Image (spheres, helix red, strand yellow):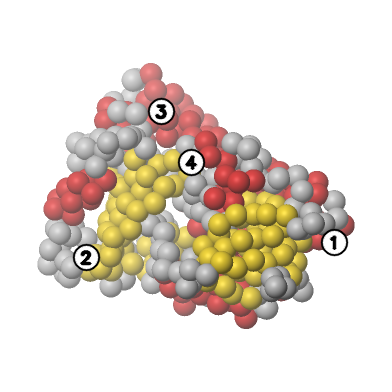
């Protein structure tokens, strides 16, 4: 005799920032939520979050392991450009601790947590979704759900089974090593500064990074070029910065999507969120804020679907996200394809980063996630300077 399946309003598959945020919001709204997450998963990530995330998602500053006050951009010729944040900061989090804090908050709001790996989506006799997964002991489990949120990361299995085109998202492969932060003897290291390397030997089409996390530091690289050795690039970067002397705490690698899917929902009862929906910013690879926003918007769409029974409500998650951030993603995509394509162009790009107008607008847009309109003349100046770089009039 088959055991009776447990019923939920929503099953959220994936417990990263997107899934945990969606589960928290839906549980807080009184929905019966199951949050399903794999054990021991830590995404390779620089761990940077804008301060607006703390207020928008009610996250306490106590989760931060460091506050970054500047970024240093390093060109192929080793030119260094410092970009001070000003009055703001960039918060740094450790993903293993931060993600678990988000999952625990969802549980405190009423979500049921389960450890397991999603296998497939079936249908009951009445058409209700049946989520099939293997639990922590490898045993098969099934639960019924009126709605499903797929937040199971890049190369989402939920998306592959449910959303046409989900398997064709372009990716950057990311790899980083968490190492012990150096002491004062390392004069090039600053625990309040993120270093970003635009150099073809470290990444032929993206960038490499050194991001401080207090007692530890993330040293990583991303690239979509097949055959490029990410580990060798990290070895080179650690050797060049003296970070090869510290103990390696752990190593992680995973794909990072760089283009939002054209559709997030199945037109019936399922919607994607976070990396599964492809919402990682091109050029920067920033994903935590966008993942949490995507999780929230998917939760709002699902809540409306559950209340009305109208599947078209699920489309609103993508529509609202793209209305708010689609233009930024489009511009960043163009920027990545152009400026990251050769060391000559990377050199010019770093030169642009030295411009005070560029620095001001970059940090304002990053920290507050809005296009800056307060200084229109700055946009005009940047336009002509950028045009000069493109035409080769301005020397790097």
Q: Which class describes the residues within 10 Å of circle 2: few (<14), some (14-19), or many (20+)?
A: some
**Extreme residue toward the bottom, this view:** 108
- Judged left or right of residue 58, residue 253 is left
In the image, residue 248 above or below residue 325: below
Whether residue 360 is visible, yes or no, is: no
Q: Earlier in the sequence, mark 1 or mark 2?
A: 2
Say which label, 1 or 3, has the lower sequence index: 1
* Viewer-side residue, 151 vs 374: 151
**Mark 2 and mark 3: Cα distance apart in space:** 34 Å
| Residue, far right | 308
User: Label 3 vs label 4: CA separation?
Assistant: 15 Å
Q: Mark 2 points at which residue?
A: 248
Indicate which disc residue 151 carries: none
Which residue in the structure is indicated by mark 4? 258
| Front in this rendered view, residue 245 or 155 | 155
Label 2, secondary structure: give it.
Answer: strand
Q: Image check: 223 left or right of 371?
A: left
- Helix, strand, or loop for circle 3? helix
* Labels 4 and 1: the sequence-earlier one: 4
Residue at which label 1 appears: 307
The residue mark sitting in front, 3 or 4, is 4
Mark 2 vs 3, N-terminal side: 2
Seen from the viewer's position, the closer of residues 11 and 208 is 11
Secondary structure type for disc 1 = helix
């Amino acid at each position: 005799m088959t055991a009776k399946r447990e019923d939920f309003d929503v099953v959220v598959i994936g417990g990263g920032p997107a899934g945990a945020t969606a589960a928290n919001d839906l549980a807080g709204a009184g929905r019966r939520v199951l949050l399903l997450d794999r054990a021991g998963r830590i995404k390779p990530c620089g761990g940077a979050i804008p301060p607006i995330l703390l207020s928008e998602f009610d996250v306490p500053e106590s989760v931060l392991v460091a506050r970054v006050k500047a970024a240093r951009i390093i060109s192929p010729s080793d030119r260094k450009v410092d970009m001070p944040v000003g009055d703001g900061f960039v918060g740094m989090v450790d993903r293993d601790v931060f993600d678990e804090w988000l999952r625990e908050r969802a549980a405190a709001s009423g979500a049921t947590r389960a450890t397991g790996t999603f296998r497939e989506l079936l249908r009951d006799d009445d058409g209700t979704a049946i989520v099939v997964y293997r639990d922590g002991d490898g045993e098969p489990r099934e639960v019924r759900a009126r709605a499903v949120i797929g937040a199971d990361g890049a190369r989402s299995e939920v998306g592959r089974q449910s959303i046409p085109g989900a398997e064709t998202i372009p990716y950057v492969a990311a790899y980083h090593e968490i190492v012990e932060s150096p002491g004062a003897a390392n004069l090039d290291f600053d625990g309040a500064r993120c270093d970003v390397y635009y150099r073809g030997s470290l990444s032929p089409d993206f960038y490499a990074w050194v991001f401080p996390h207090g007692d530890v530091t993330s040293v990583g690289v991303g690239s979509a070029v097949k055959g490029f050795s990410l580990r060798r690039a990290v070895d080179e970067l650690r050797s060049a910065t003296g970070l090869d002397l510290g103990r390696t705490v752990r190593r992680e690698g995973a794909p990072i999507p760089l283009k939002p899917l054209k559709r997030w929902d199945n037109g019936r009862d399922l919607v994607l969120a976070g990396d599964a929906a492809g919402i990682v910013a091109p050029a920067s690879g920033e994903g935590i804020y966008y993942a949490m926003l995507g999780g929230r918007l998917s939760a709002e769409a699902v809540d409306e679907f559950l209340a009305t029974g109208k599947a078209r409500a699920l489309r609103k998650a993508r529509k609202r996200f793209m209305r708010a951030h689609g233009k930024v993603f489009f511009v960043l995509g163009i920027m990545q394809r152009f400026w990251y394509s050769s060391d000559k162009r990377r050199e010019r790009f770093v030169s642009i980063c030295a411009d005070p107008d560029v620095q001001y607008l970059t940090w304002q847009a990053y920290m507050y996630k809005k296009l800056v309109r307060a200084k229109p003349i700055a946009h005009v100046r940047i336009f002509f300077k950028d045009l000069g770089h493109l035409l080769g009039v301005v020397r790097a």
